[in-house]
Amino acid sequence: MEIALGSRLKHAWNAFVNDRYTSTYSEVGRGSSYRPDRPRFTRGNKNSIVTSVYNRIALDTASINISHVQLDSGGRYVSTITSGLNSCLSLEANIDQTGRALIQDIVMSMLDEGCIAIVPIDTTDDPKFTSSYDINSVRVGKIIDWYPKHVKVRVYNDKTGVKEDVTLPKSIVGIVENPLYAVINEPNSTMQRLIRKLNLLDAVDEQSSSGKLDLIIQLPYVIKSEARRKQAEDRRKDIENQLAGSKFGIAYTDGTERITQLNRSVENNLMAQIEYLTSMLYSQLGITQSILDGTADDKTMLNYYNRTIEPIISAIVDEIKRKFLTKTARSQNKSISFFRDPFKLVPVSQIAEIADKFTRNEIMTSNEIRQVVGLMPAEDPKADELRNKNLSQPNGGEEKVAV
């Protein structure tokens, strides 16, 4: 039924005209010029180029779909369960983050801290008293203190707009430790040694570009007495004043004085050590330079996904399954699974050949193949059938040839 004009005018809303939500501080809460829930690196990681490695790993891990699923008796995927937990993992984790942004936050914080907490914020029931509850929102928290059966977690509170410390039981908090902890987070690991060397290199670069001249002035007399020393000091200050007061930084000296400049590049093996540690780190993480610049082939990417991404995503999924699914749910073959799209790295030139093999061997239907390449599903019911269209059908129909 058509809505009356008066009703439409009464309930109409405009973001600029109806600005009643931003009238007072008490209505909208505490404000900030930057996003307060954003993950920030610690221990010098934010000043190092290793952040690009962390970000690459986090992006590739977040590209994998995680779902709350129903399995059959053989542990095979049957369907996706519509639940609050599945919505947090795939659609909206909280008021500030999507499901994909949550996974990226988890990975980046885990690589930086070594161990993080996945904290359920809004639930349908109190998890301290019952295990039968659904999760409506989750956030990533930093573990401040460890206790025998509890942890103190610093997590962002979207009600107050600041991060707060809360003590929660370990049984209701997902605690994920970096599976690459020995390589990345140990105090004397390859990553930490590389970070220290990079910070040293930054310090050397800053010192060499600080604007100092580093000059030695050789005066034409021996400086042993106090009077000569005072005379040399006056001469030094005179040259400093000439350089500071000159528009182009020009000063004059006596013909008997000699000036030696010391700000020459000092040869050291710092850069060689950084290159060695970088290559060692890449080999231990299963990363190559071609992965970072996007020129890696399919074998290199497969090795990267198996050695680097799979352990990280498995650690996250296993902890979510262990803490956020009850024993009853697991006994009913409910689980948390992750799925990586195998067609993301396939070039267009190979799609036709793969589509033919998958449909001919009755692995995928025509509509599933059309979905992979971004086409709308066909309305023909036969497009949803798992059958080889190159063979005659048992009902005596005409032979169909796949195109």
Image (cartoon, helix red, strand yellow):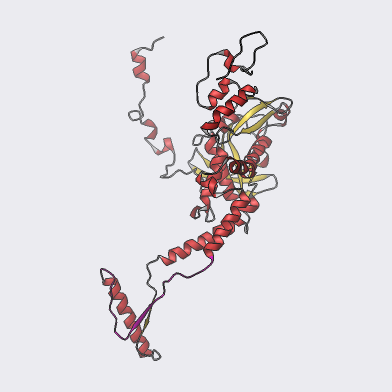
Instruction: Answer left or right for 287 relative to 238.
Output: right
Residue 296 makes an appearance in the image: yes
Residue 164 makes an appearance in the image: no
Q: Position of residue 328 (x, y in %)?
A: 72, 28
Instruction: Answer left or right for 202 relative to 234.
Output: right
Check residue 258 for magenta coloring: yes
Quarter of the image holding residue 123? top right
Residue that appears at 36% across and 15% down: 7
Q: Quadrant of the N terminus?
A: top left
Q: Position of residue 352 (x, y in %)?
A: 55, 27
Q: Position of residue 373 (x, y in %)?
A: 52, 27
Check residue 347 for magenta coloring: no
- In the image, residue 242 above or below residue 296: below
Quarter of the image holding residue 261? bottom left
Instruction: Answer left or right for 298 relative to 208.
Output: right
Q: Which residues are magenta?
A: 247-269
Quarter of the image holding residue 82? top right
Q: In this rendered view, identify the residue nearer to me: 188 or 359.
A: 359
- In the image, residue 334 above or below residue 46: above
Label the magenta part by its dominant secondary structure: loop
Q: In this rendered view, identify the residue nearer to me: 287 or 330.
A: 287
Q: In this rendered view, identify the residue nearer to me: 218 or 113.
A: 218
